[in-house]
Amino acid sequence: MDWDVGQSGVRQTHTPTNSQALNSSEAGGRIITDPPSSQPGPVGRPIGHGYPSLPPGYQNMAQPPNVPPMHPTQPYSSGPAAYPQPPMGAAQLSPSMAAMSMQAQTPDSLRVVNLLQERNLLPPTPYQPPTPCLPQDLQRVNCSPDVFCSTLTSIPQTQALLNKAKLPLGLLLHPFKDLSQLPVVTSSTIVRCRSCRTYINPFVSFLDQRRWKCNLCYRVNDVPEEFMYNPVSRSYGEPHKRPEVQNATIEFIAPSEYMLRPPQPAVYLFVLDVSHNAMQTGYVDVVCQSLLENLNSLPGDTRTKIGFITFDSTIHFYNLQEGLSQPQMLIVSDIEDIFLPTPDSLLVNFNESKELVGDLLKSLPQMFSKTMETQSALGPALQAAFKLLSPTGGRVSVFQSQLPTMGVGALKSREDPNQRASAKEIQHLSPATDFYKKLALDCSGQQVAVDLFMLTSQYCDLASLGCISRYSAGTVYYYPSYHNEHNPAQTERFQKDLKRYLTRKIGFEAVMRIRCTKGLSIHTFHGNFFVRSTDLLSLPNVNPDAGFAVQMSIEENLVDMQVVSFQAALLYTSSKGERRIRVHTMCLPVVNSLSDIFAGADVQAITGLLASMAVDRSVTASLSDARDAMTNAVIDSLSSYRTSVLTIQQPGLLSPNCLRLFPLYILALLKQRAFRTGTSTRLDDRVFAMCQLKSQPLAYLMLMIHPALYRLDDLTDEGALNVNDRTIPQPRVLQLSVEKLSREGAFLMDAGSVIYLWVGKSCNPQFLTQVLGVPNYPALPQNLTQLPELDTAESTRTRAFVGWLREQRPFYPLLHVIKDESQLKANFMQNMVEDRTESALSYYEFLLHVQQQISK
Ligand SMILES: [Zn+2]
């Protein structure tokens, strides 16, 4: 089984802190505005005047006709040579680039590591992706790997070479990430290549002041008159200093030609399951309370519309028309042929009907509290939602607590709990009906996205229901064993998620296109969307927490190229009704040797892409097929490295330093909920993990696959960070093995969306009193989710560290303090991926297996 591809590393992200007002970033950002086109600067200036002040780059305009290939075989020979910094653009790449650029890349990435002997694999500090081997001036302006990265930061010259490396080639994107700094340009003309429609970017070359050459298709384009004026420096005649040419990530406010229709308003429809089962969980109280608290922070403007539908065996609409003394409920019991009772008053202007909305939210929890109706007509409720939003587009938020039982889309349980652990092959990973996918595609066509919140105590067939979000570019949220009273941890998570969900930025009626330099081709997409045409992703909604991945192949040899570029352009309507385009451009070097390909491998990006590919494989083929393919990816790439890169053969399992975490990450994936076998795993838990692997940004994905473990009871300020005058301790990341734990300690595990603090039975009394505020271990309460604010150095230090971890992501991970007898201890222990379990190999055994296969 193979793919046709030829630390506990925490990925360092630069997400701004929660406290920064990210969601209002539309209002923030640097807005750069062109002058009115009637004042294009000194218009009378003669063209072709000799350009006395041109920087040297302009004069050296043409690409050398026969660029000799790079010589990365002698990469480290040149000393700290003074490289003349070309002012800009790919046109200045010189043959000496290879020698120069390899200085930036630490040769440490190719250091040979014998994995069987290496005891300390994890980097002591958060994982840093490799820096592409580019001239400094190009790398300086390159796109941040947090938003756009490649599995290989050096692109192979040919597909044959890529096949030989046996590493997957693909891109990972986090295109709508919250950014603390985003240049925003308002311009009457957005400069794009006339041939391939690429947006002008830092990696184009200027032949002279009036002509630029596209870095994707190489067409020579004219520089429009307006572009000659630089709104940043307020000077004329320096097009290469325009913000579009200085920033790899930029946002344009689009002129009217980017609109097929007037930008839609922000439209929010909430669809709530109010059957007996749903009411029992108490979730409706949480949703209504959260909406009441956050409604005023919903992104939007004076045009924002809002509506509500509830359902059990019938569908209930709410007339919220301004002027009514109270909301009116309208019940439609014919679920076979759904119609809207009063189409014009069900979706109302939020500002005008704010009071009625408030009244409804205050009364909803009581309205159905005594219901005995157990049926669920989810399918018809979704059809109603689609009808209601079709004219405008918008966002549907569905809250569901059970398998739908009535009308279209009704489902039957497909899980046999007795088979969970023993089944040889996992069944039912694909949908039982195409109803949800079809409806999602209809939604997508009308710019409607559906987000699904599953709050369940039993199997609800996420594999089928999830399709409604997957193809409409929505998100699935999943809260197994949800109950307001019986499961307070889950309830708190739901509350935090809802707050983020309701207040985060949103883009409507969006499309994303990814372009790459001629010769490269994108062929498979991962994430939640619908592929409308070969390279156009339809995203009725886009949110800042969504990640995407694409696979690539090399269709034509890239022999004459030293660099290639990739551009992702996301066109969307902001909640304030502006049409905007966010553009990310990444530039990477082309190399012609296997050692250079390996030297630039980004092990986390590779793992992330393989995880998405394995999810697809599990559904289209089988889980065991997907597991084999992941293992083979390790075997094949290390085997290729051994036979084709290493010149001196040594015993052991050898890996280049940059891939030393590859077997560990793959083993972690094999033990991940999505792919594990031999352990009792609920089908929905597995399917949800698969959804997440396909749609999370890489940074969150990596914590989910391989959490970070730290010892907390002996924190010191040694090596601490200083962030805004706060001292943030930086404990060493520990291997995920029980060997690293001790009963005398307290250990924190950061799994991305959740943080566990396991306190050992004989934990240092100092930690118990000074940090947890209890006199002894028995006094430590179960279900503690907050660290007390104690006036001790230990407490301050610990809270500073936990707070800092939380600031790394835009959502709020919950903290669970767990004792030996806590139920959650099993979750904590299951993440000890280096240890052997009944059904899975230890890390060392896995290495031996890989080595055995390589030497076959
Ligand atoms: Zn072009």
Image (cartoon, helix red, strand yellow):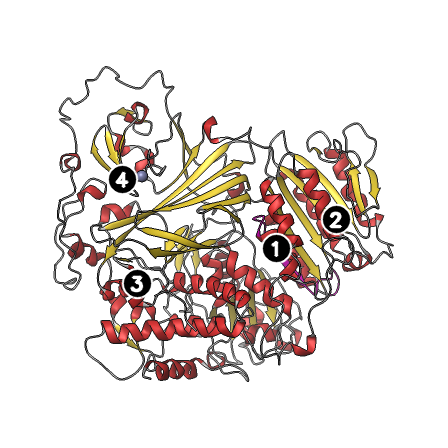
Mark sitting earlier along the chain (2/3): 3
Residues 832 and 696: in front is 696
Asked whether mark 2 lies closer than 8 Å to ligand 1, one says no
Q: Amino acid at mark 4?
A: Val
- Label 3, on which residue? 162
Residue 708, percent across and down?
47, 67
Of tags 1 and 4, which is closer to the observer?
1
Question: Which quadrant of the structure image shows residue 661?
Answer: bottom left
Q: In the image, residue 139 lies at what x, y percent?
A: 27, 49
N-term-proximal mark, 1 vs 3:
3
| Highlighted magenta segment, given as a residue range | 471-486
The label shown at residue 467 is 1
User: In the rendered view, would you say 161 is above or below 536?
Assistant: below
Front: mark 4 or 2:
2
The Cα–Cα distance between marks 1 and 4, rounded to whole angstroms, is 40 Å
> Residue at 74% of width from left, 31% of height from top?
344
Can residue 734 be spotted in the picture?
A: no
**Number of numbered discs on residues:** 4
Amino acid type of the residue tagged 3 in the rendering: Leu
